Amino acid sequence: MGIEPQDTSAHPSAVQRLHERLLIEANLSSSMVRTSDGARVHVAEQGSGPPVVFVHGSGSPGSFWLPLLPHLEGMRAVVVDRPGFGLSDPPPATAMGEGWEARWLDMLLDALALPAAILVGHSMGGLWSLRFTLKRPERVVGLALIAAPGLPGTRAMLPFRLMGTPGVRSLIERQRETPRTVAQFAKPVSEGDSLRAYPELVELMVAVGNDPIAARSLRAEIRALVAPWALATRTGFRRRARVREEDLHEVAVPTLLVWGEHDPLGGSDVARTIQSCIPGAELALVPGGHAPWLGSPHRVASVLSEWVKRVRWADAPS
């Protein structure tokens, strides 16, 4: 369905039109829900079955999942735009503080009328989903993490280290997004070749990169995640943004790790270390980089679909 123009007044009209076109082409239903703090969140859905909420990473909207969605089976896929990205309202000035991400996901599930759900989080969306799971495990039936940063052994990717470095950051922020700059970003996250196969996603990333609302949201997330002068630090992450091994020991829901074999966050050994810290966690190593469904959509969709079937939904709160 179409999206009413007044629902996205904070975002440029070009971003609205592009999202509307992509969602119509993908045959996804589209709506706005309002969280208890009054903010509007854009949601796209497909399929039927247990609700699986897809939470995207930094600098990309929910539509970045589009190559994966046609191959999913046996689930109601609920794709959200996190605050400030896609068509959702920007986050409040107090966002990115202690526990805000978990509170937002709590409000989101309320707005979706979901007592509990399976969460699939990519990159920063994975970190948000993990933090929510640790705080509100009764609302999480299962947790799938695709390349979540800040976990033991991971290292901040070069583009984010640069964006966290004074001087370099200001140069990047003044740069206008183009297909060339999108390609420059995709290469160090090991998705240069795979992203070129999706010209519509390149077009989307250009539009999002030139959206001032999304740009402010991205800057706030980078400041919260990446250490100042990150190029000179070992992990590149702020201390308070890191997840400790003992935190992972507390994850008490079925967990799946999907890890690209060439993910610059860390290699397969890092993925296995993280798996060993989460009780009962499963690990799927797949071809690709930081967004492995771009190059291996069938493989990632198969892994997720089969795992969702095994998650014991009957144990969820009613």
Image (tube, helix red, strand yellow):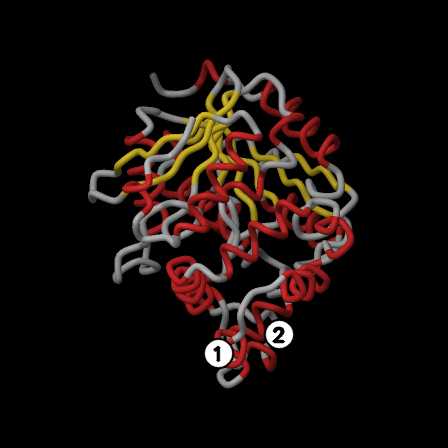
Q: Residues within 10 Å of mark 2 (few under 14, many from 20)?
A: few
Lateral position of residue 49 relative to residue 99, left or right: right
Question: CB of mark 2 within 8 Å of CB of mark 1?
Answer: no
| Residue occupying image coordinates x 67% and y 26% | 71
Q: Is residue 240 above or below residue 292?
A: below
Local SS, label 2: loop
Q: Nearer the viewer, residue 196 or 304?
A: 196
Q: Position of residue 56 (x, y in %)?
A: 51, 45
Q: Which residue is mark 2?
A: 234
| Residue occupying image coordinates x 57% and y 44% | 64
Q: Is residue 148 above or below residue 139?
A: below
- Mark 2 or mark 1, which has the lower sequence index? 1
- How many angstroms separate mark 2 from mark 1 (CA)? 12 Å
Q: Position of residue 259 (x, y in %)?
A: 69, 45
**Residue 228 image label:** 1
Q: Position of residue 178 (x, y in %)?
A: 60, 64
Local SS, label 1: loop
Direction bottom: furthest residue: 167
Q: Quadrant of the C terminus?
A: top left
| Residue occupying image coordinates x 65% and y 64% | 185
Query: Of circles 2 and 1, which is in front?
Result: 1
Name the image quarter holding residue 179. Answer: bottom right
Name the image quarter holding residue 137. Answer: top left
For the image, the number of numbered tags is: 2
**Residue 48 image label:** none
Lateral position of residue 105 relative to residue 181, left or right: left
Q: Quadrant of the N terminus?
A: top left
Q: Is residue 19 above or below residue 97?
A: above
Which amino acid is tagged 1?
Pro
